[in-house]
Image: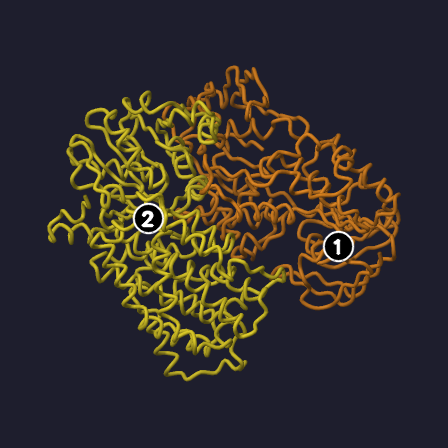
Amino acid sequence: MNYFNTLPLRLQLRELGKCSLLDPSEYNGVEILKGKKIVIIGCGAQGLNQGLNLRDSGLDVSYALREGAITDQRQSWKNASENGFTVDTFDKLVPTADLVINLTPDKQHSNAVSQVMPMMKEGACLSYSHGFNIVEEGMQIRDDLTVIMVAPKSPGTEVREEYKRGFGVPTLIAVHTDNDPKGDGVEFAKAYAVGTGGHRAGVLMSSFVAEVKSDLMGEQTILCGMLQTGSILCYDKMIEKGIDAAYASKLVQQGWETITEALKVGGNTNMMNRLSNPAKIKAYTLAEELKDIMRSLYERHMDRIMTGDFSEEMMKDWANDDADLLKWREETNALAFEKSVPTTDEIDEQAYFDDGILMIAMVKAGVELAFESMVAAGIKAESAYYESLHEVPLIANLISRKKLYEMNRVISDTAEYGCYLFSQKSVPLLKDFMSKIETDVIGAGLTSDSNGADNQQLDTINRKIQDHPVEKIGVILRDYMTKNRN
Amino acid sequence: MQISIENLFFPINQKRSLRIDNWFLSEGKSALICGANGSGKSVFAQLLSGKLSSASGEIQFSRPDKLASVSFELEAEILAEDRYHNDSEFMEGGVDHGRVAREIIGNGENLTSICDLIGISYLLERPFKEISTGEARKVLIAKALIKSPELLILDEPLSGLDIKSRQEILELFNSLINQGVQLLLFDFYNEELPTSISHLVYLFEGNIVLEGPRKDVTQSSKWKTYTGFQIQLPHHLPDCYHYDQLDVDCPFVETVDLEVAYNGKMVFKDLNWVFKSGEHWRISGPNGSGKSTLLSMISGDNPKAYGKDITLFGIKRGSGESIWDIKQHFGILSSSLHRDYRVSVTLLEAVVSGFYDSIGLYDKPTESQWRIGKEWIELLGMKGREQTPFSALSFGEQRRTYCSSRCQITINLIVG
């Protein structure tokens, strides 16, 4: 049963609205975890690298794997033991653990937690990195157990690299309100975040509910859904207009990563500033049009996530051996863009901006719409930022390395399922808009070389870009995430 | 092949540019191109190998397709590609080891013979990013040779190689020249550089100042002026930052029956070592013998140190200490750490980061730390360039910066 739907509105609002950046004075190192037994379930990139960091912070870490993984000496077993960790089966390690960290893939949570929970000792702590299992699947956890969430907002390898440099990655923490019997869940979550180095890059105190609802929204709309839609539409348009197919292929595949690198550093403002004055005005206007057309679609996704309709539909497909998901995945594989071969010629970094005005407009519109829809639904700006703008470069990177089919295959099942639902609606929705698009905004760049612009118009647009709430909160959060606070 | 350059101009940093008005090298002629750190060697090599394009001027080759190169930049490029394609997040076990040496070298009929000749056949299936510095050099040389190039551009090809390997590679270069391969070798001048190369070009602050037969150039009166010691050692080094002294009776390092293996392959075993305060140790061995592994065991960087009997500065590894408790006691210089210094900081920030053992600067340094940092920069002869991005410095300048940053912390122990 969907946990969120069991809450009265008052509590739904309270949970959704939880999100605040912790002050450095609120940490007490890893004290509460010192000398305690930490057992990590699962040894993938997050599991292994978080474990290495926690141990380097002076904590006692071991790995519990399924018996099969140990007897077959699978890669997860090899990596944990090669790194000098104790590795054993669930029944050997879990009963002694003070903190059990569940870092299995999302879809296995139900199984893994059901198996582990009865073995856990009285009063121990169970940690998640994603709340789907609790919030959407409604997993009930034993009353005596404390349930927390610690979710570094970066890939596992980066979690390790940043720690070794003496820094960390931004991290979201939460305590499951229904499972905090001693009231010290937050202390465990903070200490765990400190152990992985997260406190140096900023820790957000959120809730299971806010994390799940915002994560689902971000991944299916601006992140995967919008980039998939944009890739299809931009590539097809360029082919229709006679742009060289190899150039079009590379412009789209590498373009998302190049333009969102600017986004990562300085938000929409910096990304838009990479354009000439006339191109910026053009991109702004296109983005406004896109927002008008797509707003209802974004809101519909947010609504279906809030009601639980989205996860219910998806879980039906899980129960049906992923029939829809696999069918849609194959449809993605058949796309013209997917089959295209990119040119090996170098494209200048600036050319991705100059020739990709429409792509920039799509990113800006998508980021703002996802952010606005989340905030309108009661999610705090901080959460909305991390689940929209912050993660766009990560998905853009996947597309630049793997195109759409592989991108979808490697992201979580919830993201993939939502991505297909979004793009199936958005591609037809943008048909009329696309019919008016020419190569000046995608593929060839503006025809005039002049950088001239109307001062009044440019000033108004610049203000509108930088005054958007996603930009305001972005400046604060990015400042936390980057090194130089001196 | 024939190379001619006209009016070549390339800015190296704010103060210095590489400027070559007119240079000609005739068909088949090999040359040594020497100079100090920051003289423009690497920039010149990269312009020739097409990795950089000049701001103005022209380089003409008779057959540019038959060219191959070896350089630190090439190594960095390969490692960056591996990082870009890292699929750790999607692999069971969460570790993507990247491409193996064989994939880096590429295919060619002569693969086996080249690898046998260079002595790297044993490491072809090992991940490139996990082999030692010297081994990586040899892989790059093999990668260059497999293309059967007519022109080889070598930027410090011998660096990181052990004595035996240096001899072997030098002999290899000599025999390549005898087979008609043309070599352009960029390095600090040294007698041992391949004797078959008789032509010497000397770069000074971005200009070719001497050129001619090797013997004539090195015996000329100007040679001494250009190559003499340029750094004057100061009366004292800048201040160090002080912290609680260790117990003097406590050894820095103590290992009992230390054994390290990777995937069941032994690196070393039965190591019982006590390293006391006041002692100096040199640990030597050929490339790939485990020097870096041993260093990583005592620097806190190797996860394998857990569960072993290692005591560092009186702290038993795995007894609940944090790695930062250990790292505060020593400075470390190593080529792999220099390689990992990939963050956007200024020269001054890079130096000051040494106070925190961090790669990049994440803390707020004190006034005196900034001051000490500036003194080190002056000592390095780089005054006025404090705000230059670290990444924009030449390889040698980066290395100097990195060394000084690690020297200024509480010198109890410097390893490297």
Instruction: Look at label 1 and name its amino acid.
Output: Leu
The picture's colour for chain A is: yellow
**x%, y% of residue A472?**
31, 63
**x%, y% of residue A314?**
30, 49
| Of A13 and A381, the residue lying toward us | A13
| Of B324 and A394, the residue lying toward us | A394
Q: Is residue B96 left or right of residue A323?
A: right
Q: Quick one: label 2, few (<14), some, or many (20+) residues within 10 Å?
A: many
Q: Which chain is orange?
A: B
- Asked if badges 1 and 2 are on one and the same chain, I answer no
Name the residue located 67 percent from the left edge and 62 percent from the top edge.
Answer: B53
Q: Is residue A486 visible?
A: no
Instruction: Look at label 2 and name its amino acid.
Output: Gly
Assign the N terminus of chain A to one quadrant of the image. Answer: top left
Disc 1/disc 2 C-alpha distance (Å): 48 Å
Residue highlighted by disc 2: A202
Q: Chain of mark 1?
A: B
Q: Quadrant of residue B273?
A: top right
Residue highlighted by disc 1: B203
